[in-house]
């Protein structure tokens, strides 16, 4: 992969979607539709300026301030789906070149522009991915492939802009890539000791730990 950099920045605000989609018959609200911005944007502890969430219980907040997605995935999706989705098509704020779930680890500290971030958790995809694009099995494909994206918490506020490099400052848990965490969450890694080790990772968000704890309980219950 090339040296990591931000290809594009996207923000969005909640809007109404009519029912009759692949996932719901009721109208729904979401800020999933992220649109690119060309100017530099200030990153606050909880969000990028201009961005917002409709469901603040499950989205946003300090541990999920910024959502990242690998740019290379778009080429793969286009080949598999026959549809060219735009950057921001998976609800991400930052579309990243040179990084993906296989080489991003929980706890990684990175610098972009004036800001500093830490990888806090995997992205837990939901039905809105399918509903947004009218592709009924897209959510299942995202989970199966592990092309989920990942979240950042903000350690230092500041301005960022597209095209800037992403500099890795610290790697604390090289064994816990986003890919491996996804294997745990989707039941592809059922090693109880490994999952207990993951729960001991302080940098993993509290919300993600709840998901991991549930996986561990299911494993122990069937032991």
Image (cartoon, helix red, strand yellow):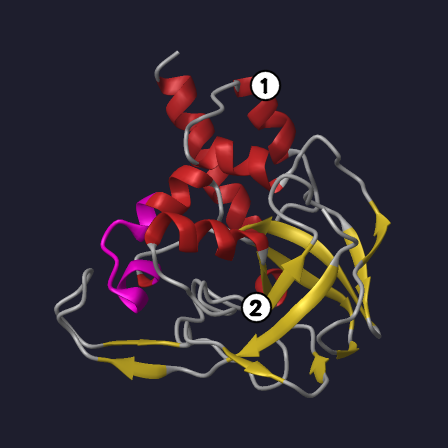
Determine the residue positioned at 68% across, 44% down. Answer: 106
Q: Which mark is residue 65?
A: none
- Work out whether 197 lies above or below 50: above
Q: Earlier in the sequence, mark 1 or mark 2?
A: 2
Residue 8 drawn above or below residue 150? below
The residue pinned by badge 2 equals 61
Q: Is residue 150 left or right of residue 202?
A: left
Q: Position of residue 71 (x, y in %)?
A: 58, 58
Return the residue nearer the eye: 116 or 130: 130
Where disc 2 sits, the SS reads loop
Q: Residue at point 42% right, 76% down? A: 31
Looking at the rendered image, the quarter that the C terminus falls into is: top left
For the residue pair 168 and 121, the one nearer the viewer reads as 168
Left or right of 107? Residue 135 is left
Residue at (44% x, 67% y) in the render: 89
| Residues rendered magenta in the picture | 129-140
Up/down of 122 relative to 17, above or below: above
């Amino acid at each position: 992969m090339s040296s990591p950099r931000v290809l594009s920045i996207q923000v969005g605000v909640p809007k109404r979607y009519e029912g009759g989609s692949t996932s719901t018959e009721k109208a729904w609200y979401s800020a999933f539709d992220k649109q690119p911005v060309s100017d530099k944007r200030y990153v606050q502890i909880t969000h990028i300026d201009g961005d917002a969430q409709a469901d603040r219980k499950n989205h946003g907040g300090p541990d999920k301030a910024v959502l990242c997605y690998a740019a290379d995935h778009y080429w793969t999706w286009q080949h598999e789906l026959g549809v060219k989705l735009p950057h921001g098509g998976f609800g991400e704020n930052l579309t990243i070149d040179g990084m993906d779930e296989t080489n991003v680890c929980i706890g990684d500290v990175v610098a972009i522009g004036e800001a500093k971030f830490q990888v806090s958790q995997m992205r837990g995809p939901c039905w809105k991915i399918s509903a947004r694009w009218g592709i009924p099995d897209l959510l299942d494909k995202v989970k199966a492939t592990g092309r989920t994206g990942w979240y950042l918490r903000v350690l230092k506020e500041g301005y960022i802009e597209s095209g800037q490099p992403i500099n890795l400052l610290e790697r604390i848990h090289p064994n816990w890539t986003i890919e491996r965490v996804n294997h745990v969450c989707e039941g592809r890694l059922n090693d109880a000791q490994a999952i207990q080790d993951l729960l001991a990772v302080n940098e993993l968000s509290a919300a993600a730990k709840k998901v991991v704890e549930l996986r561990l309980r299911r494993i122990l219950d069937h032991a």
